[in-house]
């Protein structure tokens, strides 16, 4: 009996030891392809996180809406069904943190450096802090790039948008932007855009070239205008309860992995967009158009009033502060 008890005790000890050493799993869900800047950075974070923690953490990356679509993923994070996301900044408006919609304002960032002045400074940190009451911890801003417009007709002037059904993310700012152009904004999940363009449910959309190319949107869009009218970026976020519950040394290693992955992501974002635009040109199915200075001025004249229109929603002081910081 004593021997049997010893065997049982040893088996239990081995079992407990194995359980104690089981890796901490982080499910990282996102909606874009693996070969986009965000997709590549998620894979880099996985690599670094697992290496830095010597296997104590396992990161499972689920790209292309494999687990959740746009509208579903935020709730999944808050419920703890996934631990990490990298949603576009527009996604925080519907969550109740409307200030993030400032990033959607047309022409608010004249350059990438102007953008980094905001995201890497007190304004960016302050915005991430506003997610804490929602059960979310913001870890980093990831870059994509400036957006182009596409449709099956030339888009050279604001008048060319009149009556077009243009797909947008769920954002009051983007809704106002398309209405200012005379278009009819249509909110659709990112994973549904290709089919919607193919079948004519929508006429056109806006995206950085890397998203357009990796989702094959250029195959069903005859015209692209290099408007660079708006910015698309992401915030890498994690379930706050999960994050706060991690051992301090693990959290520190993950923070380092995220910082390194963020540096990597910013380095490849513009390169990938340039390569995607070149690939779209070479595919030969889409006409690429660069607006003249006069045409760009016409777009700015129509779209800049959206800033004033959104002051009551986003906050006049925040818009002013971002504009001032971006001008440095």
Image: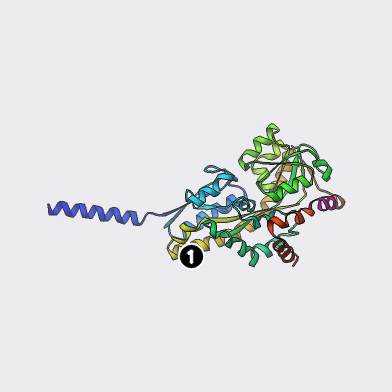
Q: Position of residue 223 (x, y in %)?
A: 77, 40
Q: Nearer the viewer, residue 29 or 100?
A: 100
Q: Nearer the viewer, residue 68 or 2?
A: 68
Question: Number of marks in the image?
Answer: 1
Task: Residue 300: say if magenta.
Answer: yes
Q: Which residue lies under the disc numbered 1?
A: 252
Q: Is the magenta stretch mostly helix, strand or loop?
A: helix
Q: Where is residue 293 in the image (x, y as percent from the top left)?
A: 85, 53
Residue 214 relative to residue 230: left or right: left
Going 52% across and 60% down the picture, which residue do you hit?
257
Q: Which image quarter holds the C terminus?
A: bottom right
Determine crowd level at label 1: few under 14, some 14-19, many 20+ residues with C-alpha closer than 10 A.
some
Residue 49 relative to residue 151: left or right: left
Q: Would you identify the image quadrant in which residue 200 lies? A: top right
Check the image and report above or below for 154 versus 80: above
Q: What stretch is highlighted in magenta?
A: 295-304
Q: Name the image colouring.
A: rainbow
Q: Name the outermost residue toward the top.
A: 199
Residue 317 relative to residue 28: left or right: right
Task: Residue 173: say if magenta.
Answer: no
The secondary structure type at the circle numbered 1 is helix
Q: Would you identify the image quadrant in which residue 187 lies? A: top right
Q: Position of residue 273 (x, y in %)?
A: 69, 50
Q: Position of residue 135 (x, y in %)?
A: 51, 57
Check the image and report above or below for 209 versus 102: above
Q: Which of 133 and 53 is in front in this view?
A: 133
Going 65% across and 62% down the picture, which residue do you hit?
119
Asked if residue 121 can be seen in this view, the reply is: no
Q: Would you identify the image quadrant in which residue 316 lies? A: bottom right
Asked if residue 155 can be seen in this view, the reply is: yes
């Amino acid at each position: 009996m004593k021997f049997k008890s010893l065997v049982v005790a040893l088996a239990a000890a081995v079992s407990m030891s194995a359980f104690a050493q089981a890796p901490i799993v982080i499910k990282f869900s996102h909606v874009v392809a693996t070969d986009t800047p965000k997709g590549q950075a998620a894979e880099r974070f996985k690599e670094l996180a697992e290496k830095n923690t010597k296997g104590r953490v396992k990161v499972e990356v689920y790209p292309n809406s494999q687990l959740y679509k746009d509208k579903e993923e935020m709730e999944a994070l808050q419920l703890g069904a996934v631990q990490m996301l990298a949603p576009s900044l527009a996604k925080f408006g519907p969550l109740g943190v409307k200030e993030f919609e400032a990033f959607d304002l047309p022409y608010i960032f004249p350059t990438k450096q102007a953008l980094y002045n905001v995201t890497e400074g007190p304004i960016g940190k302050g915005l991430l802090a506003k997610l804490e009451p929602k059960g979310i911890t913001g870890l980093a801003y990831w870059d994509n790039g400036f957006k182009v417009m596409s449709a099956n007709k030339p888009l050279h002037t604001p008048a060319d948008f009149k009556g077009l059904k243009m797909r947008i993310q769920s954002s009051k700012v983007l809704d106002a932007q398309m209405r200012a152009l005379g278009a009819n904004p249509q909110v659709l999940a990112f994973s549904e855009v290709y089919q919607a363009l193919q079948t004519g449910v929508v006429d056109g959309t806006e995206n950085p070239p890397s998203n357009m190319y990796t989702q094959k949107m250029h195959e069903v869009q005859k015209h692209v205008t290099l408007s660079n009218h708006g910015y698309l970026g992401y915030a890498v976020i994690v379930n706050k309860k999960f994050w706060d519950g991690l051992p301090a040394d693990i959290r520190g290693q993950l923070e380092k992995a995220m910082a390194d992955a963020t540096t990597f992501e910013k380095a490849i974002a513009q390169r990938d967009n340039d390569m995607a635009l070149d690939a779209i040109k070479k595919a030969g199915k889409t006409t690429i158009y660069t607006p003249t200075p006069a045409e760009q001025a016409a777009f700015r004249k129509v779209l800049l009033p959206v800033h004033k229109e959104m002051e009551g929603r986003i906050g006049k002081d925040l818009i002013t502060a971002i504009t001032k910081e971006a001008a440095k």
